[in-house]
Image (spheres, rainbow, N blue to C red):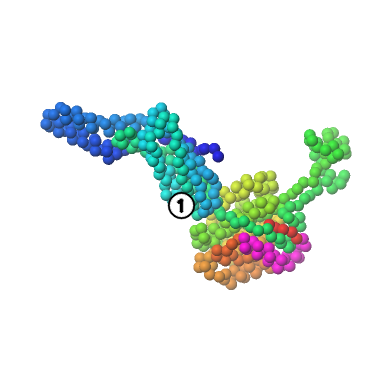
Amino acid sequence: MAADGAGAPDGEVKGGVRAALGGLTTRGRSFLAAGVAAAICAYVLGQGDLLRVGLLLATLPLVCVAVLYRTRYRVASSRRLSPRRVAAGSESRVHLRMDNVSRLPTGLLMLQDHVPYVLGARPRFVLDRMEAGGRREVSYRVRSDLRGRYPLGPLQLRLTDPFGMCELTRSFSAYDTLTVIPRTEVLPPVRLAGEASGYGEGRQRSLALAGDDDVIPRTYRYGDDLRRVHWRSTARYGELMVRREEQPQRARCTVLLDTRAVAFHGAGPDSAFEWAVSGAASAMVHMLERGFSVRLLTDTGTSVPGEGDGGFAGTSQDSADSAGLMMDTLAVVDHSEGAGLSRAYDALRGGEGLLVAFLGDLDEEQAALAARMRQRSGTAVAFLLDSGAWLTGGSVPGAVEERLRQLREAGWTALAVPPGASLADLWRQAGEDRTVFGASAAGTTEHSGSWG
């Protein structure tokens, strides 16, 4: 990865000469005090030699201050993160490189990088004398159990003179950002009954050619097979036209994440909301790898912009790029102020294919609204979290069982998520339960296929 974050210390030192004098070390202050005292004693006693010694002692730290103060832009820095995007609980290494761009060697250099407290303590390094045109490299590790975007920098550089009389702190202007994305689990492939037609094995194919009278031609391109030339359209348009080939069309999957603040209680990496975010990330990555075009939808009705039709990513984008864009969104997603799922319901226009929902606490009204979402999808799978059970570590209460029953009667494959549950196990259980609850959806479809 190319080095970035290059910069140089700020040209101006706040406070001017006063700030430079404030950078005197204990040794420098001692020399200055001794020189002033010797000069005063020499004046009182009339000793010329003592006066010269006092002036020398007092002048040395002042000269060091002047030289160090006028030494600007002597050192350039660069920062490199490896990797720049890391899962929660994993480490990233930060590489710092210092280059002496002046013609003179440096003194002792002390480096300190600004790091948010959630990533660990601020790293400090001491670099020995750096020759003219020299280079030094150091590195440190950062780690966070909480997802988010964290700024690294600016880097602070403490300059010292060869005699250790003065220290000045200069700040570099450049900084970088570390993105901590949610943890993901590897999900097993499962097969469901009752899936909408055309979504078997995660793909469908549509013929552009349905007969001579129903053909959709296009302009001839270099390399096209001449056997596909459509002469009737060629005569009509006055240019060479060919029949379209059979084109693959990806199945769609919508991952719905409930972010309502009223639906989740508690905070921290082990909270119900963080499990839901991690579950949505795992399902999203899994479906992209299975060849689906995926849309990430929240209760606010907004989705991550994609190049595909209707905001679905993975159709015209590379799957890794699509996953990275959605992961960056999940890294900073937070609770919404909304109280209902109506906006998400409006965003489901029908024909969504597979719908995978991660839902928090639902009252009777929101449970009924979620149940109606089943009518706008092919297959619907819901993972229902009770934040109260996650806070106390207890079992699923009767109210959650009632919501599960309501969703299942509407055709959902609905599962309760106990505290600390593994999504991979629930994912496999959803595939098994679908054969049980498939009868409730049999009234709308008679096809079967795989959903992940």
User: Which image quarter: residue 347?
Assistant: bottom right
Residue 145, image x and y in percent?
50, 54
Q: Residues within 10 Å of mark 1 (few under 14, many from 20)?
A: few
Q: In this view of the protein, can residue 12 be seen by the observer?
A: no
The N terminus lies in quadrant: top right
Q: As rendered, which of 122 and 95 lies closer to the eye?
A: 95
| Drawn side of residue 256 relative to residue 8, left or right | right
Q: Secondary structure at mark 1?
A: helix
Query: Which amino acid type corresponds to the residue marked 1 in the rendered image?
Result: Val
The residue that disc 1 covers is 118
Q: Residue at x 13, y 29 (%)?
A: 47
| Secondary structure mainly formed by the magenta segment | helix
Q: Residue at x 73, y 63 (%)?
A: 193
Magenta stretch in the rendered image: 424-447
Query: What residue is rendered at 15% in x and 31% in y?
Result: 42
Question: Measured from the top left, where is residue 402 in percent x and y?
Answer: 62, 70
Q: Indicate yes or no whether the magenta region holds residue 434.
A: yes
Q: Is residue 250 above or below residue 71?
A: below
